[in-house]
Amino acid sequence: DHQVRFFSIDGSHLAEATYRDMKLAHASLADGGIVVIDDYFAEGFPGVSEGVQRFFSEQDVLCSTSHAEPIRPFLVGYNKVYFAHEAFVETYQEAVYARLSVIGDSYMHVGTKWMLGSPILLLTETINVYKPQREPL
């Protein structure tokens, strides 16, 4: 019975594969473990979000048959979504807030949103684009 503390999903980007990866991650996640999925919002890979959505639509049934605790998203940033068991979500969000100066710089912003029925932290960066002044003709 092997459990993992960190499970990264960055694979085929197809809906069925992502769904299976989420099921495997959920089934093998240790207490306090984190699942991170890449490219959830990437427009070129709609299968990633489709597979995650399918997992969440079936999670209650999966938990009732396996007696596993449900996972919830707690953080979105850098093109990734982070999930943990419900009991750890608030602790991880507080840890992110406490370490914002380490995560980013003055361009890093954190906000709160809702995703899959759960409050999440959303990390965003302000990108300043320098546009040189053109000389008049």
Image: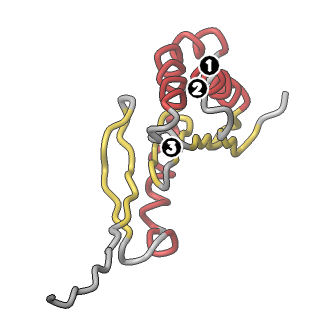
Residue at 32 percent of width and 74 percent of height: 129
Callout 1 secondary element:
helix
Is the residue under label 3 in contact with that under label 1 (CB below 8 Å)?
no
Looking at the image, is mark 1 or mark 3 earlier in the sequence? 1
Task: Give the residue at mark 2.
Answer: 69
Where is residue 33? Give x, y as percent: 65, 42
Marks 1 and 3, Cα distance to the nearest angstrom? Answer: 18 Å
State which mark lies toward you, 2 or 1.
1
Is 132 situated left or right of 137 in this image?
right
Marks 2 and 1, Cα distance to the nearest angstrom? Answer: 22 Å
Callout 3 secondary element:
strand
Amino acid type at circle 1 is Glu
Q: Nearer the viewer, residue 97 or 136?
A: 136
Callout 2 secondary element:
loop
Task: Give the residue at mark 3.
Answer: 81
Task: Give the residue at mark 1.
Answer: 16
Where is residue 71? Give x, y as percent: 54, 31
What is the number of the mark on residue 78? Answer: none
Q: Nearer the viewer, residue 39 or 21?
A: 39
Q: Nearer the viewer, residue 55 or 119?
A: 55
Amino acid type at circle 3 is Val
Looking at the image, is mark 2 or mark 3 earlier in the sequence? 2
Residue furthest to the right: 1
Marks 2 and 3, Cα distance to the nearest angstrom? Answer: 18 Å
State which mark lies toward you, 2 or 3.
3
